[in-house]
């Protein structure tokens, strides 16, 4: 169960989602991808997309306006 | 949002990043709120009384847009990129509801013999509409937000959208300057089509709502296909 | 005093209304109600980009320019609006209000953060995107709010035509995003 990190801080819409989509392909089932974001749209559309693909998702607010979207690949 | 059950994520590595002690921004929020109310009251007192009301309406729009992360850009862009149409469907719902509300107001004026309000928003249809649509579509996706989205993100602290807004203003002035040419060569004599003139009031509303309904179903089917969502039943 | 804010943050209703995001559908319903209310109040639907053209004109005039001879500002209504100045302009109040409302919403959720520009790509995207939106909105007679949202709600065919080409533009923009801006 490897853990991968994806830094999307400061990225404009919809780059966090596009990058997460691309990166998750490299993961094996059971791996975890942590996406660091500070975009309010992304804290909604990244989990929504990930859940639609059947992955487990958790969103952690780590600071004012900063979130970690933790995706466990199904 | 899909309500799939979420088992807690098992992580092999405990979090090593120390979480910053978050301080509440509520005190600042209170100050900003007071400033906005003060601005509204002062404006209404020294300028037209409606000035404060418009500021309030804007504030309400901005609040709702931010809270729901509503984005017209995403409603048209996401189907192209990920296949997601949740915003597309929400926008369609908004279209349907406002159609009903607006028509009620317009018909009420019409039926009582008054001038129908808001008719200046029935724009002529010409190649300028086509060109404008494509340009705006490209621009909003690249800039990361449409007109309302850009303003919303300025309020959220995005420097990029402040820059986008500056150039939106410049582009608007440039466009305004060229409108003389466009009007003369492209737009003049183009039709303005107010649907009730074609289908009658009831017909227009019914047809428009039906089209919105069909688009909603189409959006749903598109999303299911692109995201590979299978039927749970 | 700090304890007060912390206790509020833990309150159930605070979380529901101010902390957590609304669903898209909730947003759609609330926006629609507000749109209709604005139309009922002022006789005009919501618009955003027309105001930005006026801002451009006022700034241009500050630098000594003149838009008096421009076709776009030639109507008596447009001239009156320009002469009345920015503080009397309803559209300005709406736009400034949107910025304020979004700021307030973010602060109330304690989610505000300055997000600086990260790369040259973002600068190019903002400049290009802004110009295209500004110019395109004037051509079409409005933006995603005035020409699309309000246009369609006003039962104008132009709203639908605009929507079709907006989608085309969004598709092109998506391709450009993936190719140049990622």
Image: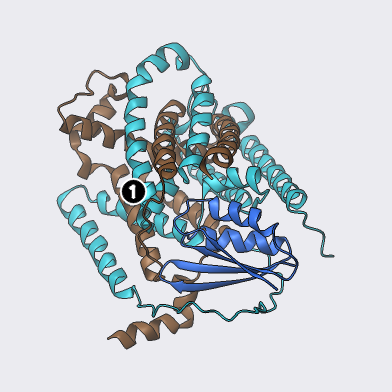
| Location of residue B86 by image quarter | bottom right
Q: Residue at x 48, y 34 (%)?
A: B136
Total marks shown come to: 1
Chain of the residue where label 1 is placed in the rendered structure: C
Position of residue A9 relative to residue B218, above or below, is: below
Residue located beneath label 1 in the image = C94
Q: Which residue lies furthest to the top in this view?
A: B185
Name the one closer to the observer, B121 or B68: B68
- Which colour denotes chain B? cyan
- Relative placement, left or right, of C124 versus C148 is left
Residue drawn at x 18%, y 30% is C61
Q: Is residue C41 visible?
A: no
Q: The blue chain is which one?
A: A
Whole-percent x, y for residue C80 in the image: 22, 31
Q: Is mark 1 on a helix, strand or loop?
A: helix
Q: In the rendered image, which quarter contains the N terminus of chain A?
A: bottom right
Residue under the image location 56 percent in, 48 percent down: B74
- Place of residue B117 in the rendered image (x, y in percent of width and height, measured from the top left): 42, 37
Task: Check the image and name the residue furthest to the right.
Answer: B233
Query: Is residue C110 shown to the viewer in this render?
Result: yes
Q: Can you say which quadrant of the picture contains the C terminus of chain A?
A: bottom right
Q: Which one is in front, B198 or B166?
A: B166
């Amino acid at each position: 169960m490897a853990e991968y990190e994806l830094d999307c801080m400061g990225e404009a819409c919809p780059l966090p989602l596009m990058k997460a989509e691309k990166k998750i392909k490299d993961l094996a089932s059971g791996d975890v991808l942590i996406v660091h974001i500070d975009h309010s749209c992304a804290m909604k559309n990244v989990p929504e997309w990930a859940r639609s693909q059947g992955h487990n998702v958790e969103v952690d607010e780590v600071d004012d306006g900063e979130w970690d979207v933790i995706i466990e690949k199904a | 949002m899909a309500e799939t059950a979420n088992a807690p994520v098992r992580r092999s590595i405990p979090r090593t990043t120390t979480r910053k002690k978050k301080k509440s921004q509520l005190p600042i929020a209170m100050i900003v709120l007071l400033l906005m109310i003060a601005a509204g009251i002062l404006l209404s007192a020294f300028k037209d009384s409606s000035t404060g009301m418009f500021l309030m309406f804007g504030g309400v729009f901005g609040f709702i847009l931010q809270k729901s992360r509503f984005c017209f850009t995403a409603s048209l862009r996401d189907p192209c990129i990920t296949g997601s149409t949740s915003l597309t469907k929400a926008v369609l719902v908004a279209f349907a509801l406002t159609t009903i509300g607006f028509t009620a107001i317009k018909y009420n004026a019409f039926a009582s013999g008054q001038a129908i309000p808001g008719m200046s928003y029935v724009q002529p249809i010409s190649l300028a509409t086509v060109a404008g649509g494509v340009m705006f579509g490209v621009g909003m996706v690249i800039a990361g937000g449409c007109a309302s989205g850009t303003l919303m993100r300025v309020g959220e602290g995005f420097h990029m959208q402040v820059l986008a807004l500056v150039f939106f203003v410049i582009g608007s002035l440039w466009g305004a300057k060229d409108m003389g040419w466009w009007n003369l060569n492209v737009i003049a004599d183009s039709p303005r089509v107010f649907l009730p003139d074609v289908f009658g009031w009831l017909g227009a509303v019914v047809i428009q709502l039906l089209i919105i309904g069909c688009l909603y179903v189409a959006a749903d089917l598109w999303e299911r296909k692109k995201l590979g969502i299978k039927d749970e039943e | 005093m700090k304890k007060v804010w912390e206790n509020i943050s833990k309150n159930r209703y605070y979380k529901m209304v101010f902390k957590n995001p609304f669903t898209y559908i909730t947003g759609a319903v609330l926006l629609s109600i507000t749109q209709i209310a604005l139309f009922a109040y002022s006789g005009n639907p919501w618009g955003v980009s027309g105001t930005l053209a006026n801002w451009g004109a006022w700034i241009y005039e500050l630098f000594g320019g003149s838009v008096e001879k421009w076709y776009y500002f030639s109507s008596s209504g447009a001239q009156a609006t320009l002469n009345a100045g920015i503080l009397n302009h309803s559209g300005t109040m709406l736009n400034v209000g949107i910025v304020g409302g979004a700021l307030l919403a973010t602060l109330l959720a304690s989610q505000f953060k300055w997000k600086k520009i990260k790369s040259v790509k973002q600068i190019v995207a903002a400049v290009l995107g802004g110009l295209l939106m500004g110019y395109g909105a004037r051509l079409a007679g409005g933006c995603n709010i005035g020409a699309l949202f309000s246009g369609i709600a006003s039962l104008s065919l132009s709203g639908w035509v605009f929507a079709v080409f907006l989608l085309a533009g969004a598709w092109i923009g998506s391709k450009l995003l993936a190719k140049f801006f990622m």
